[in-house]
Image (spheres, rainbow, N blue to C red):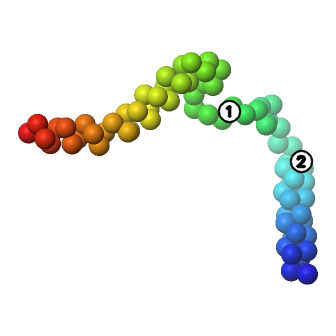
Amino acid sequence: MINSVGTAARQAVRRFTTSAVRKSGHHDPYDGVPGHNFPFSTKNRHVLLAIFMVYMGSGFAIPFLSVRHQLLK
C-alpha cells in the first residue's frame, strides 16, 4: 500500500514537471546531447585523455611533491 502511494506520487510529479517544461515553450536544440554542457570539448579523445591525465595527475602528485620538499629542507 505504501509503495504504491509513493509510486503514484513520483509519477504525478514527473508528469507535472514534464508538462510544465512543454508548456513553457522551452526548446534547447542540444537537449539530450551527451557532453554538450561540459566546459571542454569531448570530440578528440586523445586531447581529452591528455587533459584528464594532467588534471588528475597533478592532484595526485601534490602530496608526494610536498613530502619531497619537506625532506629536502
Q: Amino acid at mark 1?
A: Gly
Confirm or deny contact between disc 1 and disc 2 (CB under 8 A): no
Residue 2, above or below 29: below
Image location (x, y in percent) of residue 60: 38, 39
Which residue occupies 91% across, 74% down? 4
Q: Residue at x 23, y 41 (%)?
A: 66
Is residue 39 visible from the viewing direction of this image? Answer: yes
**Callout 2 amino acid:** Arg
In the picture provided, is 11 more to the left or to the right than 44?
A: right
Question: In the picture provided, is 62 more to the left or to the right than 12?
Answer: left
Quarter of the image where one finds residue 56: top left
For disc 1, the neighbor class at 10 Å (few under 14, some 14 to 19, many from 20) is few
Q: Earlier in the sequence, mark 1 or mark 2?
A: 2
Q: Residue at 11% across / 37% down in the picture?
A: 72
Residue linked to disc 2: 22
Out of 28 and 32, give the one closest to the viewer.
32
Residue 43 is left or right of residue 4, and the answer is left
Above or below 47: residue 72: below
Q: Secondary structure at mark 2?
A: helix
Residue identified by numbered label 1: 35
Check the picture and name the quadrant holding the C terminus. top left
Front position in the image: 16 or 10? 10
Vertical relation: 56 (above or below) 10? above
Q: Residue at x 88, y 69 (%)?
A: 7
Visible in this render: residue 16? no
| Residue density around tag 2, few if under 14, some if 14–19, many if 20 or more, within 10 Å | few
Q: Secondary structure at mark 1?
A: loop
- Residue 1 is situated, as x and y percent measured from the top left of the image, at 91, 81
